[in-house]
Amino acid sequence: MDYSVSQDDKAWLEETYGKLSVKLSAECARIGSMIPYIPIDGHYHDVDTLEGLYWWTNGFWAGILWQMYHAAGDEAYRKAASGVEDRLDQALIGYEGLHHDVGFMWLHSAVANYRLTGNKDSRRRGLHAANLLAGRFNPAGKFIRAWNGDRTGWMIVDCMMNIPILYWASKETGDRRFSFIAQEHADTCRRIIVRDDGSCNHIAALNPDTGECLEYPGGQGFASGSSWSRGQAWGLYGFALSYRHTQKKEYLDTAKSIAHYVIANFALNDWLPLVDFRSPLKPLKYDSTAAMIASCGLLEIAAHVGEYEKPLYLNAALKILRACEKAFCNWNPEEDAVMGHGTGAYHSTGKDADVPIIYGDYFFVEAVLRLLGKDFLIW
Ligand code: GLY
């Protein structure tokens, strides 16, 4: 995909890619196959328990490494990424702590490896994860259930970004069951989670026996009825990807509708990302991860629309990326993590409030590489 950016944007992208290469190469040499999440005092720490291995973000470092391996061809990235994938086997075997986020965990590790190297063990891991996700489908309500425990009727907008592993498994095996489940979930999400104005709920609690929507718990945003920015970004990018994999126009229309709402909100805030678009402005809370995910989603939409429609999505993505790079990035190669000011949830006060978070870096890398034509599709 040629995004045809301006000379000025191109220069910024080349410079940013150069800085990413220096920083990520230093990180790779320092942490190798560690599984990082949030740095403390500038340094990542490894996962050291089985419980820790189940955490949903554990594939993103491998995703960064595979993207950089694809772009730069450096073997050190490939070795480190393969090591992360091997370590995640303990989570596949352990099983009990896994939930809907198996897509994130194995798309970025095993499936990425298989796509780039054809490794058969990686393919097996990816299909195993896809089967686990498909097994979470509730046929009465036509949704993939979120998390574990007794909330059997909960579905969440985030899962739109896990279902690409089902599209991949369908294509890989020729068995369309996986894609049917993904589309059923996407259809229910369009109907129940996306609102008419293009904003999204985070969670919908359904009656698991009938699929009737009972309520909208507040989730990671400010409150029920608010507009958690990362949730909007998951929906935006997730529906655009469902369009890529199915060519169903309603998915692209939904992605655009969320995008228009998201762009309007970013434009009101100097292209910087509030944690929730419907929350008090004081204290001002940012979540750079929402901005990076939304940027990738906008670029995905730009890849599927005509020449006169494309600038809206492309230029909005560039404005967000450039504003966040200027305001939030740490380019010191001796410290881990690039993109600062990530926030796990609106009410977070602990270690995931206003800090660099690994998936913020993943989506930043993906967006920059995409715009330079150096990425590969992980989704
Ligand atoms: N998918 C979990 C989150 O966005 O925090």
Image (tube, rainbow, N blue to C red):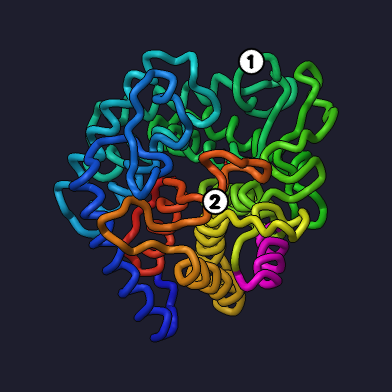
Residue 175 in view (yes/no): yes
> How far from the left and from the top, in percent, is residue 73?
18, 55
Left or right placement of residue 199 versus residue 76 in this view? right
For the C terminus, the quadrant is: top left
Q: Residue at x 32, y 25 (%)?
A: 124
- Image quadrant where residue 37 sits: top left
Of 127 and 17, nearer the camera is: 17
> How far from the left and from the top, in percent, is residue 28?
23, 47
Marks 2/1 in contact by CB < 8 Å: the verdict is: no
View extreme (front): residue: 41
Q: Residue at x 31, y 67 (%)?
A: 17
Which residue is labeled 1 in the image?
A: 149
Q: Residue at x 51, y 64 (%)?
A: 299
Of 144 and 343, nearer the camera is: 343
Under tag 2, what secondary structure?
loop
> How far from the left and from the top, in percent, is residue 50?
39, 18
> How far from the left and from the top, in percent, is residue 376?
34, 54
Which residue is labeled 2 in the image?
A: 354
